[in-house]
Amino acid sequence: METFTSPEFWVALFQIVGIDIVMSGDNAAVIALAARQLRGRRRHTAVFLGSLGAVVLRVLLTFVAAQLLTLSYVQTLGSLLLLWVAYRLVLPGKSQGPGEEVRDPGLMEAVRAIIIADVIMSLDNVLGLAAVARGNWFLLTIGLVISILLIVVGSSVLMRLMTRYPVIVIMGGALLGYVAGDMMLSDPIWNGLDWLKGSWVHNGLPLMLAALVALFGVRRSG
């Protein structure tokens, strides 16, 4: 994979592009949810800073993701943190009364939510990219650049859709709840519990958490 003429290089590049396409959807949803209530330049700034911070941390995670995923409690704690992020993101914006000035939510709060959620959901992604690139930093860099483009473009499209169709906000929060449930069950701490190995648990818990986040969002926006 050292040169452009190597077939292995192009096969690995194709695999990286495929991983980015598959994995970028939920990250784009996080950015769209976090920045949807901002306006003008603040929205673009949140998308840029959140994406930049997430990418920098992804590079660092590349070195430690494999070790982190083998540690007990890491994925369980990450899933709980992701649930908290989902809860915050489905909260409706505050409506202003007569004569009150419209206030945007905090820019840094949106950036923080983007970075936290993106890093949590990127553990498996960076493992996949690292495995395909096999230490080739040029390939890893290409993968990161492609993921940035996909996430930024995807989040921009989702934000416009969320403005027109608010139900997409609830769907995005439910997606984060599902990812949190799936991540929790992947924690090595649960390997000794045979009853957790059933397909009904692995399918039921993520769906239950997705439904709880969606229900909360519906009740708060109603």
Image (tube, rainbow, N blue to C red):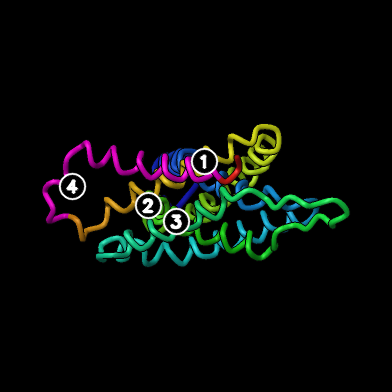
Instruction: Residue at 47% x, 58% y: name it.
Output: 84
- Disc 4 target residue: 196
**Left-right relation of 156 to 189:** right
Q: Mark 3 points at which residue?
A: 82
Q: What stretch is highlighted in magenta?
A: 191-219
Q: Where is residue 82 in the image (x, y as percent from the top left)?
A: 44, 56
**Looking at the picture, which amino acid does disc 2 mark?**
Asp
Q: Is residue 66 magenta?
A: no
Given this view, does label 3 or label 1 mark the residue nearer the observer?
A: 3
Q: Dot 4: what SS? A: helix
Mark 3 residue element: helix
Residue at mark 2 to residue at mark 1: CA–CA distance: 14 Å
What's the distance in space between the residues labelled 3 and 4, CA to CA? 21 Å
Q: Which of marks 2 and 1 is nearer the N terminus?
A: 1
Q: Report if residue 6 is visible in the image.
A: no
According to the picture, the residue beneath numbered tag 2 turns out to be 124
Location of residue 186 with respect to 68 vertically, above or below: above
Give the distance between the C-alpha atoms of the residues marked 1 and 4, in whole angstroms: 28 Å
Q: Which of the two labelled residues, at mark 3 and mark 4, occupies the earlier sequence position?
A: 3
- Residue located beneath label 1 in the image: 25
The quadrant the C terminus occupies is top right
Q: Looking at this view, name the residue that lies furthest to the top.
A: 165
The 10 Å Cα crowd at callout 3, few under 14, some 14 to 19, many 20 or more, is: many
Disc 3 residue type (three-letter): Leu
Q: How many residues crowd mark 2 within 10 Å: few (<14), some (14–19), many (20+)? A: some
Badge 4 density bin: few <14, some 14–19, many ≥20, Cα 10 Å: few
